[in-house]
Amino acid sequence: MNPARTHIRLPVLLLLLLAGSVFAEGVTLPAFHHFELDNGTALLLSQQPEVPLVSVTAILRGGAVADPPEHSGLANLLASLLEKGAGDRDAAQFAEAVGASGGSLSSRADLETITISATFLARDAGLMVELLSDMLLRPGLDEAELEKLRDRSINFIRAAKDTNLNALLPIYGQAFLFGEHPYGSPVSGSETTLAGISHEDVLDFYEQQLGGDRLTIAVSGDFDVALMSARLSDAFGDWRPAAGPLPDIAAAGRQAGRRVLLIDKPGATQTYFWLGNIGVARDYENRAALDIANTVFGGRFTSMLNTELRVNSGLTYGARSQLSRASQPGSVAITSFTATESTIEAIDLALIVLGRLHEFGVDEETLESARNYILGRFPTALETAAQLGNQLAGLEAFGLDVSFINDYGAALMSTDTAAVAAVIDAVFASSDDLVFVLLGDAGLIREQVSKYGPLIEMPITEPHFRPQPATDE
Amino acid sequence: MGGPGTTITIMSLFSELRRRNVFKVLAVYLIAGWLIIKLLHHLHPVIGLPHWIEKLVGLMLIVGLPLALYFAYIYEITPVGLKKAVDVDQTQSIVYKTGQKLNAALAVMIVLLLAAMVVGRLFPEPPALIDDSPVMQAPTMQGVPPAIRSVTLENGLEIIVWPDHDIPNVALYYFVRVGGRNEYPGITGLSHFFEHMMFSGTEDLEPGEFDRIMEAAGGHNNAYTTNDITVYQDWFPRSALETVFEIESERLENLEFSPEAIESERGVVTSERRTTVDNNNINKLVEQVRATAYVAHPYQFPIIGWPSDIAAWTQEDFENFYRTYYAPNNITMVVVGDVTPEEIFELAEDYLEDIPAQEPPADVRTVEPEQQGERRVVIETDAQTPLLHVAFHAGAAADPETLAMRLLLSILVYGDSARLHRLFVEEEQLAIAIGAFPFEGFDPGLVYFYATLPPGGDLGLLEQRLFEELARIAEEGVSEAELEKARNIALAEFWGTMATINGKAASLGEAAVFHGSYEKLFDFAQDIEAVSGETLKAVAGRVFRRDNATIGMLYAPAVEAEVEE
């Protein structure tokens, strides 16, 4: 044992008395143990033995925003590489250790985090901690494995262009909206940026951006608290801090006016559209009012957007509004798809609905319906141990406290129509200030969609998500 | 100084406590007690001490503390033994010497404490935290939970209830025994389209009102259609229970089909088809492979329907369909969540029992004739990544072999350690992804393999290697370790579904519908234990034959030359 290691600096016990209690006004997080190791690693343990499974969520702050712009996808590639051999196990042995026990484990980057999630049968809790600590402290980071992963990641983007355009659309949207801002870089990279990532880049990112001071681990499910806390402090108490600083992200400013990106996929029989602007950050003070506004506008089946574009007109299978929230303001966007020939009809209708949202706001009855809707679903978001662990880890990693959950119900209850109206004005850009990203058969819609604003076009086969200067490649 | 009968000031009490070494005793006691608890805690996982020992010792130490202080105050150690402090002649008192001994003890304790911190493992939580942890036990798989109850109403509607009060929510699912297998040319996709129509208006509900009422009450819903069944899913807070029964009974009894609603929904389903099939190469190929694998049985039809049928349904089709299939005697309802069986049965009697039963729907008579040889289907379309799909005829959901096939598929494709992933994705890099799933229902279904190749990938070589590896299973079987792994995966998946009210509702319903009773769900652990390696090998031999296979390929026209060279 390394003597400098296991001192516990700050044992804090958050004991919330009513385990899992749910009130009409919302949800209260159940009791959990919270303490911090000397190296800054935060541990959160919540015993939830409903079924004989144990889950872990490990979150490292940093994530894709730490990617150099020309190497977007680096954090995500590293996250995947952590699974490809660690400790004494090579990639195949590591996969076998997970699979043989019936466990599941995944590792990925998000905008501002790298997250490892795993669930194992309760009897394999020890193995789970061993694999997690091997991945983080003793990853193989093998060059041949990196090359395979990198090639496959590039090909996954190409495959998505054949099969899953709905998944790609927001990536194009973010890239066009945010431009050079770090939130515009695709988390999973582009064909171009992935191809440029070297083994050295990955090793360097590991040293600079991963470390005990960035780590939060939440374990939930069926396990022995004392034994688990001993295992975790043993396994992670020693981990060195990350060598580099956390990326410092500035807030992107709201876009004025309109601009249009048209991505050409010849032969596509429908047009996918994403109409967005800059929204708010995760800690936005009027979160409850915003969630109500978004639920009403495009967050549920009976939302204004889905009602007009699907239920009343049959133009699409689905229309919605989406908020992405991070440490700095993310995007707020309308997204849907429609037959090529009804492209203009559907987009115009979406803009009319946006205008209506601004003009009429939300009436009392609709507000109550939306509030009930959010409150009614709320408990199911924290139903399983894995969901709870994920939530606890997220709160800790993002510097939020339990009031983010526990006070949310009360905040919804006290939100009135005036508050919702204020949030609509503040957060949802008007239809005059929108970034349009359209994906479809350009030859058939180019002329018509140019009415929305200055138009830039790129073929879907371009190996990046943002139009590039001609000299870029 | 103070004795009985003397007025004691706070200050004098303090100095007397100090003189009699009470503070030092307190310090020694606390540190020693702490070390004892740490030691016990440290030993507990190592030598298997039960938790209650720690608790008992902790309790004794807490009770002992005031006693120790009391004795320290009342008694003094004197050269002739223990005496009451008040009886000791203060000029003869050796409390100072005792104090020095205590100082020494304290020093030793502090050294031990530091040593524990430095050398030993210092446990993260204070003892109270460990003691507070209730000893909670996860369930084990032991038969059918007695809390589950079921009843069949007079009109034939079967209702299964599983109370689960973890969250104040309810999952209400109902399984209608109708799907693609009940269709024929002209009405393909009708089951799925009908599923959409269940959200249109009724006698008392305007179009869209079902959803508006549901969401305003805090609920939400969805539905899906398969080859065999159509499933409706409502999720809602307990407070919406009666509302949900009210609107569900309304649409099960009084659904209306206005021409406007049909036309609007036709547009929605066409859009659904465009997005999930026409602009999705994988599903485009699945549709063609299934249509090729079956020449007689209606499993050949796409669930969403052929475009010409979607365009042509009439109001009359819906009315016939509703009467025939949406009869209570053709439905199983499952309610899981914050409810009691009694209240559900009562609501069901109030709201659902009056819906009249109907003649049972006609059986699906067609049996797919045995395949006579390999079949192939090719799609040439715009694609960067070629696709290879291979489908084999296999068993129905209730066939005993089907569970063995599921275990076999998890050995082949589940996770990064699965055989085919390791070989084709990691080692030979012939594919960027490979997966498989069983299409299993009332009638014999398919085992379906699907692989995505890198641009320019060799479809012919991957096909050859896939058949080689499947033949290897048929010849050599699987290892005991692989079988054990498949069982563990199945077990973990089972418990994963048991963690949510949704998972429980879906599993109970599927067991009831496809296996004849919900109780079958709880045979799962013993069923997977009973599957032997020999069975897996035998199943592989029967199913993984070239003359039982339909092979589908999708590639861009330009790639064709490479494929056929």
Image (cartoon, coloured by chain):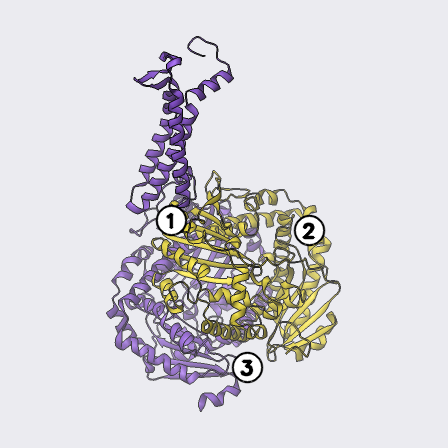
Residue most extreme to the top:
B5
Q: Which residue is mark 1?
A: A223
Q: Which residue is mark 3?
A: B382
Q: Residues within 10 Å of mark 3 (few under 14, many from 20)?
A: some
> What is the tally of numbered marks visible in this picture?
3
Q: Residues within 10 Å of mark 1 (few under 14, many from 20)?
A: many
- Tag on residue A107? none
The answer to whether marks 2 and 3 mark residues whose Cβ atoms lie closer than 8 Å is: no
Given residues B324 and B500, the one toward you in this image is B500
Whether callout 3 and callout 1 share a subunit is answered no
Q: Amino acid at mark 3?
A: Asp
Q: Amino acid at mark 1?
A: Phe
Given residues B282 and B216, the one toward you in this image is B282
Question: Considering the numbered disc 3 on the image, is that residue within a helix, a strand or a loop?
Answer: loop
Residue A387 image offset from top left, x and y in percent: 47, 53
Q: Chain of mark 2?
A: A
Which quadrant holds residue B524? bottom left
Point 41% across, 81% down: residue:
B462
Question: Considering the numbered disc 2 on the image, is that residue within a helix, a strand or a loop?
Answer: helix
Q: Amino acid at mark 2?
A: Val
The answer to whether marks 2 and 1 mark residues whose Cβ atoms lie closer than 8 Å is: no
Residue A278 image offset from top left, x and y in percent: 68, 59
Q: Is residue B424 above or below residue B167?
A: below
- Tag on residue A423? 2
Q: Chain of mark 1?
A: A
Q: Residues within 10 Å of mark 2 (few under 14, many from 20)?
A: many
Which chain identifier belongs to the yellow chain?
A
* CA gap, disc 3 and disc 1: 51 Å
* CA gap, disc 2 and disc 1: 43 Å
Residue B356 image offset from top left, x and y in percent: 42, 55
